[in-house]
Image: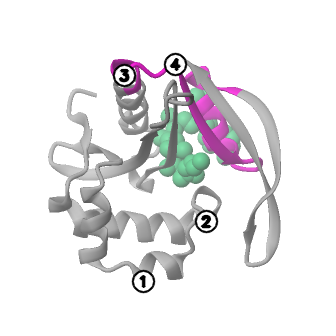
Amino acid sequence: MKKFTYRTVTSDYASDWRVLRLEGARDFPLGFLVTLEEMAAADIARCGDILKGGHIRGVYDVEKLVGFCGYRPQQLEQTKHRGEIGPFFVTQKYHGSPAAMVMMTGVIGEAREDGLEQLELFVDTENSRAIAFYERFGFERIATHRDGVRIAGNSRDDFFYTLRL
Ligand SMILES: CC(C)(COP(=O)(O)OP(=O)(O)OC[C@H]1O[C@@H](n2cnc3c(N)ncnc32)[C@H](O)[C@@H]1OP(=O)(O)O)[C@@H](O)C(=O)NCCC(=O)NCCS
């Protein structure tokens, strides 16, 4: 486990991050709101600009980026106790390894350091692997979000999960 590390993905990793996003959208469409075509339209320069926003965290096998997650603490006075995570993705070769665990542990730790009291996420109701993973960390299912996403025009439901920190 020692070899995996968690840190912010900087624009130096724009090309690697772009490859991972494309893999995710292609192989795990239930895990992404963005379509493969929308992902492909974002070139390396655009990916670098998104990364400069500072909202993407990564898990690294030594220096190789093998997964990423969005981390968005709320900014408003009345909601700043909350933060949203997602998308949350680890490249397939590393499924079942500690990589996803290191990334989730990292983002939970960062949220605590930031003073957040609640992490939130949405997950497709049929994404059973991700659901099992989130529940292992103590995320609780709060609600079903009906018709949250339409994949190729087909309506899909999400679960809304929260973790009290
Ligand atoms: C979600 C994800 C990050 C989890 O990482 P991982 O390395 O696969 O997770 P783990 O292997 O540690 O844990 C997965 C859990 O699902 C279980 N599992 C494995 N295959 C499963 C399946 N087909 N159905 C249900 N559960 C499954 C595992 O046994 C494990 O459960 P446990 O903790 O009770 O043992 C990773 O699978 C991923 O990137 N998926 C594609 C993107 C995605 O869907 N992201 C979520 C978007 S909301």
Vertical side of 9 occupied by 110: above or below? above
Label 3 sits on residue? 109
Kind of residue indicated by mark 1: Ala
Ranked by sequence position, the earlier of labels 4 and 3 is 3
Viewer-nearest of discs 2 and 3: 3
Residue type at mark 3: give it.
Gly
Task: Look at mark 1 in the image and give the residue it sits on.
Answer: 41
Q: Which residues are magenta?
A: 111-140
Q: In 3D space, how far apart are the residues under numbered discs 4 and 3 (Cα atoms)? A: 11 Å
Reply yes or no: does residue 79 show up in magenta. Answer: no
Residue under label 2 = 29
Check mark 2 vs ligand 1: CB closer than 8 Å? yes or no: no
The image quadrant where one finds ligand 1 is top right
N-terminal-most mark, 1 or 4? 1
Q: Amino acid at mark 4?
A: Glu
**Quadrant (top left, top right, bottom left, bottom right) of the N terminus:** top left
- Which mark is drawn over residue 117? 4
N-terminal-most mark, 2 or 3: 2
Q: Report x, y in % for residue 35.
A: 57, 74
The reply to whether the residue tagged 4 has its Cβ within 8 angstroms of ligand 1 is no
Residue located at (51% from left, 47% from top): 86
Work out whether residue 53 or residue 39 is closer to the camera in this orientation and state it: 53
Q: Amino acid at mark 2?
A: Pro
Q: Is residue 150 left or right of residue 106?
A: right
Give the percent coordinates (x, y) of residue 152. 73, 78
